[in-house]
Image (tube, rainbow, N blue to C red):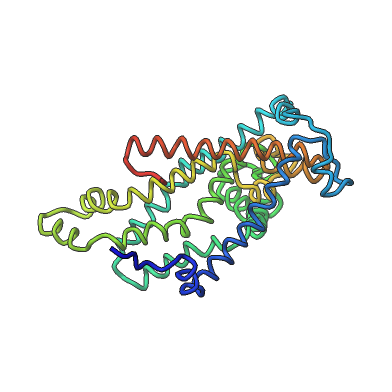
Amino acid sequence: MKNTEKPWWKRLWVQRGLQAFVFVGIAYLFVFNVIPMVGLIIAFKNYHIQNGLLGMFTGEWVGFKYFIEFFHEYNFSQILRNTVVISLLKLIFGFPVPIILAIALNEVHNRKIKRVIQTASYLPYFISWVIVSGFCVIFLNTRNGAINSVLVGLGILEKPGNFLGGPDFFWTLAVITDVWKSMGWWAILFLAAISGIDPTLYEAAIVDGAGRMSRIWNITIPAILPIITVMMILNIGGLFNGNFDQSFLLGNTGNRDTSDIIGTYVFRVGLSEGRFDYATAVGMIQSLMSVLLVFGSNKLSKKLTGSSLY
């Protein structure tokens, strides 16, 4: 039988319009994601910024010197603890919130009210952490912060609490601001998954006498379980990343014991102290741990639930 399939270059020419978009995407990834990875070589070299780009290749090889140095830093355990604990707290207290919000919005049948709640919940996502930190200063400062004034006025506190300048409240503040900022945005994903559920399943459940909670538990949650699994895997992969903007802007010398994470540490030693080689090595450790967590959580999820990223 004669093969009538066109050569690949003829098919490529027929799809030249679409292929142009693909080429732009590949070029973008290559320029901004692949080429910069050449700079990782300075993690294994004695690099000095005054030597410019050529210094990446002419610098002296030092092997794993900077990797070992990081593990022997006096504040290594504190930085690692802050990064993991803040991310874990966000995962435990913040991850369920968008799911609950999406399910609750799905149960609201008044479209106007539903639209207002949805818009109000995802607008904070577009507010930068600079503005969010400004809000925190306005509401929580010890002189005339609104929350401190209310708490002192109600007699809950004898004197204004040092919510921003002390180490005791940073983790709570980090979780609350992160949940407020991101819950509406991530709820959109779960709402999209819920909208794909066959309505006849709910109709059949109503005919069978299933109540609202029964329908949520037996239809809605199982239907969105794959997207919940994917989001959980991605969140676990970010346990060693933290949120640089949040920790950098809300952190200060007073709360550094609990606000300093790997990202802010890399920024401080890399740019402030000019140790680009050491900072690159620390960043590589962080990235490798994230990759291992993604692979590990993906494998575990595939084994336990049958759902995974790949």
Residue shown at 42% from the left, 57% from the top: 187
Q: Nearer the viewer, residue 108 or 284?
A: 284
The picture places residue 243, in percent across and down from the top left corner, at: 61, 47
Question: Where is 99 relative to 24, above or below?
Answer: above
Q: Quadrant of residue 289?
A: top right
Question: Where is 214 relative to 71, above or below?
Answer: below
- Left or right: where does residue 190 sit relative to residue 296? left
If the image is split into quadrants, where does the N terminus sit? bottom left
The picture places residue 259, in percent across and down from the top left corner, at: 66, 40
Give the residue at the far right of this rendering. Answer: 50
Residue shown at 63% from the left, 32% from the top: 80
The picture places residue 68, in percent across and down from the top left corner, at: 71, 26
Question: Where is 62 relative to 263, above or below?
Answer: above
- Left or right: where does residue 28 sit relative to residue 271? left
Residue shown at 73% from the left, 40% from the top: 41
Residue shown at 82% from the left, 49% from the top: 53
Q: Nearer the viewer, residue 208 or 66?
A: 66
Question: Where is 22 relative to 301, above or below?
Answer: below
Give the residue at the far front of this rendering. Answer: 1
- Left or right: where does residue 290 sit relative to residue 68? left
